[in-house]
Image (tube, rainbow, N blue to C red):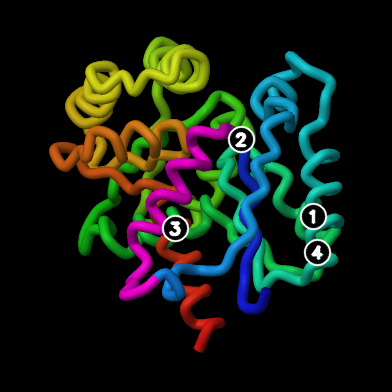
Amino acid sequence: MENFFTILGGMGTLATESFVHVLNERTPIRSDQDYLNYLLVNHATVPDRTDFILGKSTENPSSELKKDLRQYTKLQPDFFVLTCNTAHHFFDELQEVTNIPILHMPRLAAEVTSQKFGKKTGKTRVGLLATEGTIKTKVYENELNKFDHLDVVLPDTNLQQEVTNLIYRDVKESHFCNEELYYQILQKMTEEYDCDVMVLGCTELSLVQEATQNEKYPVVDAQSELANETLRLALKNRE
């Protein structure tokens, strides 16, 4: 197979399924042959990224991801797509084990946030919604802070717990897209935290966004932006 890329997924599986669905849906087609060539790796047994980062587990997920990269680099894809936001904490060490470029989802989301929501005067208040692991590593905060006109706003402990419940209790454990809780979180970030836009820095949140088709509250869906960049590169490489 030529002109293909590799998706490193399974973190979690439903979120990976959502990414692939969005990617296929956005691909311009007139026949089956117009779809993109890609290899999907659904590595569901990769240890939990947040548990390791928070010290709740000693199982380092980067070890498994490095094995994947070494294994699939042999096939020489055009690029890798890493669909887990929290796994980007290990991005630099993962990129070191392969000569194949890995797309950087938080960086893409930060660039889109700056382009679409940057104000001509004053700062744009950007609410960050993500796992506790992603918040702690500052993988999104660091990318967003590269833009002087963006001001990152983090949930307090209570609101972060609601975000965690939505991600883990509802989506991961119960396969339940809790639309009511999702809208409550977005409303609080908008009204109580005075945010101009919210960045969805977790693929489970992206899954809920896809299910709800929320247009009431302004969001930058990192997974959606990753799908856009994947599509752009894949079509370019096909030319």
Residue at mark 3:
227
Is the residue marked by circle 3 packed among few (<14), some (14-19), or many (20+) residues within 10 Å? many
Q: Amino acid at mark 4?
A: Thr
Circle 3: element type: helix
Q: Indicate the quadrant where residue 25 lies.
A: bottom left
- Find the magenta span and give its range: 12-31
The CA distance from mark 2 to mark 4 is: 20 Å
Assess whether mark 4 and mark 1 are in contact (beta carbons under 8 angstroms): yes
Q: Amino acid at mark 1?
A: Leu
Q: Indicate the quadrant where residue 219 lies.
A: top left
Give the mark, 2 or 4, whose residue is nearer the N terminus: 2
Q: Indicate the quadrant where residue 100 lies.
A: bottom right
Out of 24 and 95, give the one closest to the viewer: 24
Residue at mark 1:
69
The CA distance from mark 4 to mark 3 is: 21 Å
Q: Position of residue 35 (x, y in %)?
A: 45, 68
Assess whether mark 3 and mark 4 are in contact (beta carbons under 8 angstroms): no
For the N terminus, give its image quadrant. Answer: bottom right
Residue at mark 4:
73
Identify the residue at horizontal 80%, vertical 51% (top origin). 93
Q: Is residue 150 magenta?
A: no
Q: Amino acid at mark 2?
A: Met
**Residue 156 visible in the shown view:** no
Give the mark, 3 or 1, whose residue is nearer the N terminus: 1
